[in-house]
Amino acid sequence: MKTQRIDRVLDRIDGGFPASMERLFELLRFPSIGTDPAHAADCRAAAEWLKGTLARMGFAASVEQTTGRPLVLARYEPPESVVKGLRHVPHVLFYGHYDVQPADPHDLWTTPAFSPHVRPGKDGRDCIYARGASDDKGQVMTFVEASRAWLEIAGSLPFRLTMLIEGDEEGDAGPLDDFLVRNKSRLKGDVALVCDTGLWDPKTPMIVSSLRGCICEDVTITGPRIDLHSGYFGGPAINPIKVLSRILDGMHDRNGRVTIPGFYDGVKAPNAATRKAWKKVPFEEKAFLANAGLKTSVGEKDYSVLEQVWARPTAEVNGIWGGYMGAGSKTVLPAQASAKLSFRLVQGQDPRKVRKAFQAYVRSKLPKDCKVTFETYGGDSAGVAIAQDSHWISKARKALVDEWGVAPVVAGEGGSIPVVESFARHLKVDSVLIGFANADDAIHSPDEKYDVESYRKGIRSWARMIEEIVLETEKP
Amino acid sequence: MKTQRIDRVLDRIDGGFPASMERLFELLRFPSIGTDPAHAADCRAAAEWLKGTLARMGFAASVEQTTGRPLVLARYEPPESVVKGLRHVPHVLFYGHYDVQPADPHDLWTTPAFSPHVRPGKDGRDCIYARGASDDKGQVMTFVEASRAWLEIAGSLPFRLTMLIEGDEEGDAGPLDDFLVRNKSRLKGDVALVCDTGLWDPKTPMIVSSLRGCICEDVTITGPRIDLHSGYFGGPAINPIKVLSRILDGMHDRNGRVTIPGFYDGVKAPNAATRKAWKKVPFEEKAFLANAGLKTSVGEKDYSVLEQVWARPTAEVNGIWGGYMGAGSKTVLPAQASAKLSFRLVQGQDPRKVRKAFQAYVRSKLPKDCKVTFETYGGDSAGVAIAQDSHWISKARKALVDEWGVAPVVAGEGGSIPVVESFARHLKVDSVLIGFANADDAIHSPDEKYDVESYRKGIRSWARMIEEIVLETEKP
């Protein structure tokens, strides 16, 4: 009996795994800290290494200038002979990032952040320790190595494949967004595979079904022209801290609902397929809250904790400051008080409209003698829902079941991955978010790690996804 | 016609004024910054200078150790021959302080802070520029020089006089309070003359009729065990900034009244004489508020601005902080938020009960999953009212009318002078608060000054007050 093509690819992956490890180690050795100008050359070196690696695999690879760090663009064009007669030749995008978080404090690392080492983790599983091992170099390399094994076994792929590996993910979303706008035509594809998320647990894969967007806004209330002596003016003089407190307190009602007029405009509930999938999620509210040191949810009534995080928008205060903050007493009535807010958004909300609604709300609550100023920064990102009944999600589910032996958990994500919304907005392409990180990978922290099994089964998972795409082109 | 005794004293004051200026300059040259340990020796030197000066005037003077900076105690005992046959020999206390605020930033001073200079001020009046010129060395010396002139002209005084000049006024009220408790018997007097306040305007003297007390308290609300990612936990997780905002917002009702249960317990309205005197005060609400950049009072309804500041207690937020306060965004839900509060108290309120009432109020508003901690510091001081129909106030009024040609304004004081409450509590003695500072003296700021006329007419005013006391002893 002839060995199946996918089995030969998987054999090649397992047989070539030491070399795959070595290549990942090479990439991990670049201290490519995107947000630190002192590491600009390291970022470029990491990008050049990726370009060379992909070029040797047969990709037309380039390092592209952006307004931020350089970006690696690598395009695979299937040979004419292979695609001749195929019904449909899809264009698949792959997204990841080579930039990493700063590694300090360095003295909390067991082995140096940019000298990758393998050793057993807490529960005995072998892990790769290095900054970026999990976020996101290890994940990027799962796809690169899966593509390599496929090309080695099959000689070619019957679809167009564009890898886009950026260097600004940990910093500003602007440069990539600009790049996408400027390169719409060559990036328009059928689906984007994004590898920057996690497993549900070490034995269960996960497909992300929604992401919340995010906007940030600082607000400053000014009252008296200068800080006042609370003895001379205490009583009649308005206090901006009190004004700000009233505004922040009034932003939610007693049911946890945001009171800003227009805030919920356009909010779409997840569709039936997603709701059905979420019902199966083995989510423990108690354990989730206990992890934060809490027992009770203060989110919107009539929504489960899972829905509050995955499907409902929030208005949050991230910081507050004003008046005297030092030791002892200084009995002033301050001239100003400020707060830093962020809003997590879900599909259907327009970030610009939410920002305007918040500003209008604050102005409507502003008493006499007070002024307000706003500071807007960061890239706005909208919430995104990924329909779970789509063609590409079905393929991803099949690939993951084949590799892991269990159905992937379909999970919302309360955080934001702005690129997914950029792909949807600028390229009109849906994303499939699959990743192999574990909850204990310590991304952004000392001793960041990636399980060796995450890497190996990640490569195998993508190989199976490629198989699904290939089968698609082979349909009669 | 025989020249009146008081006229001879006043002549002596004017004739000896250059020497009085020279002595004040000597005192001003000590950089006696009480709160800075590096200036401990300068404080002692200033105290020793005062001790020597008063000893040469015939006082039994000593520099007394306290738990803080040394304190000058100088006692004048009238000769037996003088008091023989007098109906009543009062014991008069005088209070002032030789310690000064730090002088930095030094480069904002026109002439060095501890090198006194005379030059015209903004409106052409000659002024003495130095740190402490107005607060409080110049004021201390008005009384010292008045006593000196009296002793020189009359040879003796027919009453006991104890000057108490401390070195901790700008710092901690504790050391003086301790000293008063430990020295009750030798300090028990009939009246305390306190010279640490101001004129109503450069041509109108002022008698202070009430002081607000003050207590300080920090409050910290803790919710989650650590700062949380607002994407992963935003929605269900409680936010201590929001909890604190609700507590602070709830502390006043829409009429500006403090809602803390028990807060107003014991509050006494000013007596009829004080209320009558306040009606005559040429107080301009609009100008007062405009000076703070405001147009509208937010104090308690049904009270004038003047009553809000002079006769009503307050609950004020002096500072607030929590979460991320840096540039840009950090989308955390903070574990903690803190505020710094102070409460201005009026006569009848018990500072300890108000503190407990505030703590109970916060606890009553604390939601599930939150903890609160309080930090208490600073010396509590109660509010004090000084009856305007008293014997000693009548004498002070007469002395001031005689010197200034206009009736003194009877004014409340929204700030706190803890020593007045200490005198009342420990020594059971009422204070008469008279001072000669002007509103533009820049106390605590660069280019602090004291008008030369404040100094000269201050000395003359006290000489007239001494005349009133002497006349008291001479009554049949």
Image (cartoon, coloured by chain):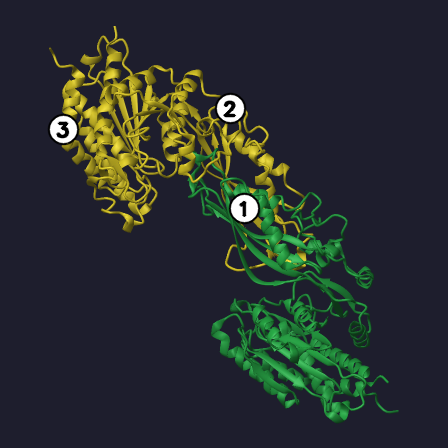
Chain colours: A green, B yellow
Q: What kind of residue is marked 3?
A: Gly
Position of residue B368 relative to residue A431, above or below, is above
User: Label 1: which residue?
Assistant: B338
Q: Is residue B414 left or right of residue B204?
A: right
User: Label 3: which residue?
Assistant: B16
Q: What kind of residue is marked 1?
A: Ser
Residue at 63% over, 36% down = B364
Q: Is residue A73 left or right of residue A395?
A: left
Residue B76 in view = no
Mark 1 or 2, nearer chain start: 2
Position of residue B434 relative to residue B468, above or below, is below
Q: Nearer the viewer, residue B234 or B40?
A: B234
Q: Position of residue A263 (x, y in %)?
A: 67, 52
Mark 3 or 1, nearer chain start: 3
Q: Which image quadrant is residue A69 in?
A: bottom right
Chain letter behind tag 3: B
Q: Position of residue B448 (x, y in %)?
A: 28, 41
Q: Which image quadrant is residue A11 in?
A: bottom right
Position of residue B309 relative to residue A204, above or below, is above
**Number of residues whose C-alpha sits closer than 10 Å to that of mark 2, classed few (under 14), some (14–19) or many (20 or more):** some
Q: What kind of residue is marked 2?
A: Val
Residue B453 in view = yes
Dots 3, 1 in contact, CB < 8 A? no
Mark 2 or 3, nearer chain start: 3
Q: CA distance from mark 1 to mark 2?
A: 29 Å
User: Label 2: which residue?
Assistant: B267
Q: Is residue A347 left or right of residue A369?
A: right
Chain letter behind tag 2: B
